[in-house]
Image (cartoon, helix red, strand yellow):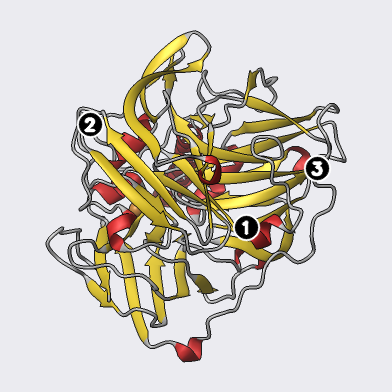
Amino acid sequence: MMTCFRHRKGALQRQNGFVSRRVILVIIIVSTLLVALITAGLSMNAAPPTAVAKTPLNIPTLIDSRSHDGPIDIEIREGEHEFYPGVKTKTSGYNAEYLGPTIKMYNGESTDIQFTNNLDEPTNIHGHGLHVVGKIDGGPQNKILPGETWRVTIPVRQQASTNWYHPHLKGSTAQQVHSGLAGFYLIEDEHSQSLGLPNTYGIDDIPLVVQDRTFVDGKMTPYPTNNMPEDLREDTLVVNGTINPYAMVPQSFVRLRLLNGSNARSYEFYLEGEQPFYKIATEGGLLEAPVEITSLKIAPGERNDIVVDMSIAKSQRVLAKLLPQSYNGFNAVLIPFSQSQSVLELRVDNALEALASELPKQLNTITPYLEKDVEVERVFELDDMSINGQQMDMKIINHESKLGQLEKWTINSGRHPFHMHGTSFLILSMNGNPPAPEDQGWKDTIYPNGTAEILLKFDYEATEQWPYMYHCHILEHEDMGMMGQFTVK
Ligand SMILES: [Cu+2]
């Protein structure tokens, strides 16, 4: 009897152990799927990548500083934008219902702009990617009160690149960008214009600001100001304010200037059928040569110019995976579950003249900074809604940099994209490895996903009154104080 009982007890224990392990496994699988579904954002509003694109892509109005008389007037205002035809949503824009004009500027020239704030709250304008003094940079100190005009003359002293402007007030950046306040600054120079790259705005050179939003009955859900999220990731891709758009393009190379203008979401872009494409530029300028790739991850604030060969197909579709909070580690397991959405369908229009039929082999010369020339090293730990254990205090200057001095910054950051004002940097290493060929260009925003070492120097002044910022480019984190300020003298 005793033996039997013992045996039964042992069997029961083993069975209990087995059952509980199985239950745990089931719980893990179910919760993984649930998290995957939530992070993937499977919504009735989101256009599946197979849906036919019916909406022509909205191309922001181009203001070319060369053909413009007097200062460029930008009104910052409220608007009503139709993301879905016939359904209006309250938004904001620069001279527009949503987003703003693309302002083209030229290296060696100056551009005069006056921004008038017709919102009923303060705002400001940061030139993200511009190499300008702190006073022009448009950090949080630089407020434009309702009814006020901020007139700025931007001396353009940097190479051809895709940059952007957006609000940067501490505490309201996330909500204001979400409402529609963002636009492109494109810088041109003689060298980039001599290369024969696709360069006809809106035809074979197309700016794309990619954002994620939520829609109920076709109406965009406003920013949740009552219940502020730690970071806002939504379920529907919006491209230049249009959903599931198409663009008619010539049967030749087409350049797409991709800007991740989302508050918190990162994306992985690729072409349907895993077709190859070329990356030609990072944030601060052209790469030395085009790099053929089949997918491209872009974190908030980053820009990458790519070129798609439209001579080989009548149409090609750019798709994006909406990435969860972190795109490595455990979350990477979830990515196969995440739904791709259409960014843009490119359709050949044979009536359009084929413009760029060859891609130059050499695009740029990048003279690397040498580690042996580094004069100052700094470390930035991004964690727990703070940087180096400190939250942004407008009264505290966190460090002082010297004009023209080469610095090495080590950025330890798991899930926070890091951006600094006033300059562009080169990557020295990413998690102990040299940067991939497509990342060996000038940058101002980086998603280390571990540890990144970068080399940089500052050529323009930023005073205590008008300091530069470094910060997390998840806008909610920036608003919560994941930001520091520094001077350059
Ligand atoms: Cu962050």
Q: Give the farthest residue toward the top.
A: 86
Amino acid carrying mark 1 in the image:
Ala
Q: Position of residue 424 (x, y in %)?
A: 47, 66
Q: Are marks 3 and 2 in contact (CB under 8 Å)?
A: no
Q: Depth-wise, is mark 3 or mark 1 nearer the camera? A: 3
* Mark 3, secondary structure of its residue: loop
Return the disc, 3 or 1, that comes first in the chain's sequence: 1
Q: Give the farthest residue toward the bottom.
A: 372
C-alpha gap between disc 3 and disc 2: 50 Å
Q: Which mark is residue 355?
A: 3
Q: Depth-wise, is mark 1 or mark 2 nearer the camera? A: 1
As drawn, is 242 to the left or to the right of 100? right
- Disc tally is 3
Return the disc, 3 or 2, that comes first in the chain's sequence: 2
Q: Is mark 1 within 8 Å of ligand 1?
A: no
Q: Position of residue 476 (x, y in %)?
A: 30, 44
Q: Is residue 430 visible?
A: no
Residue position for label 1: 281
The quadrant of the picture occupied by the C terminus is: bottom left
As drawn, is 277 to the left or to the right of 192? right
| Displayed quadrant of residue 345 | top right
Residue position for label 2: 227
Label 2: how many residues lie within 10 Å, few (<14), some (14-19) or many (20+)? few
* Mark 2, secondary structure of its residue: loop
* Mark 1, secondary structure of its residue: strand
